[in-house]
Image: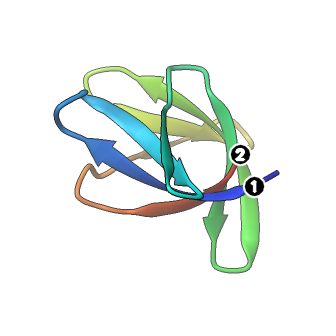
Amino acid sequence: MTEGIMTYEYDRDAWVVEINGYQYTLFCGELFELIVGQRNIPSRLELGKDWYIIMEGNVPFDLRICNVYHIYI
């Protein structure tokens, strides 16, 4: 797995991950690990009215488009 930075791209209306200077668009159903403190939490990207992820235990987590997230993908 590779660590990357996940940000919201307004022009694409999509989340993108940057790894080694390259950007990759993420799609619904995309799997990754969200880094929270010292934990890596298995997550799946989803889109309803807004973007969110489903974390382990089937817990939803709303993404804020102004935030930057660190992930392993």
**Where in the figure is residue 73, as x and y percent of width and height?**
71, 45
Residue 27 versus residue 49: which sits nearer the camera?
Answer: 27
Which residue is at the far left? 11
**Where in the figure is residue 7, as x and y percent of width and height?**
37, 51
Label 2 Cα crowd, 10 Å radius (few <14 / some 14-19 / many 20+): some
Q: Which mark is residue 45?
A: none
Residue under pointer 1: 2
Residue 51 versus residue 17: which sits nearer the camera?
Answer: 17
Q: Is the C-beta separation of discs 2 and 1 under 8 Å? A: yes
Residue at 25% across, 27% down: 12
Picture layout, residue 48 above or below residue 24? above
- Type of residue at label 1? Thr
Does residue 43 appear left or right of residue 49 in this picture? right
Does residue 60 appear left or right of residue 16 in this picture? right
Residue at 39% across, 38% down: 15
**Quadrant location of residue 3?**
bottom right
Residue at 31% across, 45% down: 8
- Type of residue at label 2? Ile
Q: What SS does tag 2 mark?
A: loop
Residue under pointer 2: 73
**Quadrant location of residue 40?**
bottom right
Count of numbered tags: 2
